[in-house]
Image (cartoon, coloured by chain):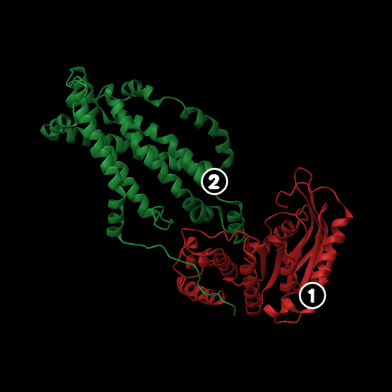
Amino acid sequence: MTSGAPVAVQPLPRGGLGRLVGRRLTNWTPAVVVLVATLAIWQEAIDLFHIKKFLLPQPWTISTTFWDQRRELLSAGWLTFQEAFGGFAIGCGVAILVALALARWRRVGEALMPYAIAANAVPIIAFAPIADAWFSPFSKSSKMAIAAVLCFFPVLVNTLRGLTSVRPESLELMHSYAASQIEIFRRVRVPTALPFVFTALKIATVLSMIGAIVAQYFGGSFNDLGVLINSRSQTFAYKEAWAGIFVACLYGIAFYIAVAFVERLALRWQPSTSD
Amino acid sequence: MSVVDVSGVSKTFTGGTNALQGIELTIEPGEFVSLIGPSGCGKSTLLRIMGDLIEPSSGDVVVNGKTARRARIDRDYGIVFQDPVLYDWRTVAKNIALPLELAGWDRRRRAARIRDMLDLVELNGFADHHPWQLSGGMQQRVSIARALSFDPALLLMDEPFGALDEMTRERLNNQLLEIWARSGSTVVFVTHSIAEAVFLSTRVVIMSPRPGRISSVIPNDLPQPRTAATREEPRFFELVTQVRDALHLGADVDRQPEAAEARL
């Protein structure tokens, strides 16, 4: 037999978590440098250009404010995160189910998609005061509703695109095996869609935090982060408002990283882009 | 009983393209039949009609004494496309096992068959690799292993080596003949390459376009088993010339500009 020898194949290193983190650390060095430089410039520029410190506090002031009030701020952030997460779970869950249905019954999908896209253009945040009226302004439900609606459309559109981006040969292959529709979904459409879904879920983490916080600007319990930021701004306690924004960032970034981590676990088969 | 019996098959696509007209073709067990012709002659359409992936507008296809549809549901077909269509989320072994899973084979039976198939296409040691870790030629061998894994009566191949370089193509041609000899399956093979058709087939079916039809059938008497040396025999060149002349004859019948090449 002519050479069927394994040529030119270099399996990518499939290192454990430790190696992954190690590689990540070196990759992140430039980003850390940028962060430190930005904070330093911010800190110094305010003194240098005599910017009013109560309008734009220095990073050092913000961090000491955060540290002094960390208990209150972090618990407010936790409450807000719960609302964001609730909205994320509901919005994304429903979006994925609807996308599965629309991909299965293509006619229905074609009839509904124009309206879904039109609805996507509606500034959902505008409904925040109304949502507060529908539910109670002090309930978690109104914030979750806004966060859920914000998450819904990007996840729906991306999931549907993923489910329908299966190549024709792939479907012909499954037909030649006499595979049923359910088997085609399970073994081809869903795995094809997963990378699309995770991209959308990562976008949705950020959207859900925005939704929850903005909804809180229009009313919420005093322990909410949005309420805290809003009330401190109104009393010119800007450094406290900034500390609140910092906490919102912390939770938002942690949420994003958590979903990105699940993505890595779920899509371990993918060729790693960092290699 | 013949494996494939195509009688009076015509296909007109919506839009009026007359892809096939009056196709008559009978294929006996163990044959290796190549379909060759210019773009738009309907060779891939004919292959897909045999595999019940496209319905003919008229005419009958009988596979193993059954309708094409019944044969597809009974999993009588293995199919290999130009693109290997492997699933990145499955390892090589799991890709090969896909039709076996669908056919409800249990784990032990699947594992044994995967080993046999990896032997057959000489990919031992690559069971746990993912498709993107393999070269194009190796991917196509996985695709062939998958198509043969469930012992289909008929192997349908649609330009399987069309995207590969000449050297890889010739090597895979040699291997395909060995696989064919060992598996004893019947093969229908669509190609653009005259040399490939002559080297592989027991019969070369020449098609011409507008409307797609069979213009001639050339039996191939090159002795078996064929090896790399076969490509240097005078008889090989004679047959290549014969096929080339037949193709040109078909093309001279009408000289309209190439129209609507869209996946016929």
Chain letter for mark 1: B
Q: CA distance from mark 2 to mark 1?
A: 44 Å
Residue B197 image offset from top left, x and y in percent = 74, 69
The green one among the chains is A
Amino acid at pointer 2: Thr
Please determine whether, in this image, residue A30 is positioned above or below residue B37.
Answer: above
Marks counted in the figure total: 2
**Residue at 40% of width from left, 54% of height from top?**
A267
Chain letter for mark 2: A
> Where is mark 2, residue-wise?
A164
> Where is mark 1, residue-wise?
B220
Q: Secondary structure at mark 1?
A: loop
Depth check, front residue: B41 or A274: A274
Residue B250 image offset from top left, x and y in percent = 85, 59
Q: Is residue A185 left or right of residue A90?
A: right
Whether tag 2 and tag 1 are in contact, CB under 8 A, the answer is no
Instruction: Indicate the colour of chain B.
Output: red
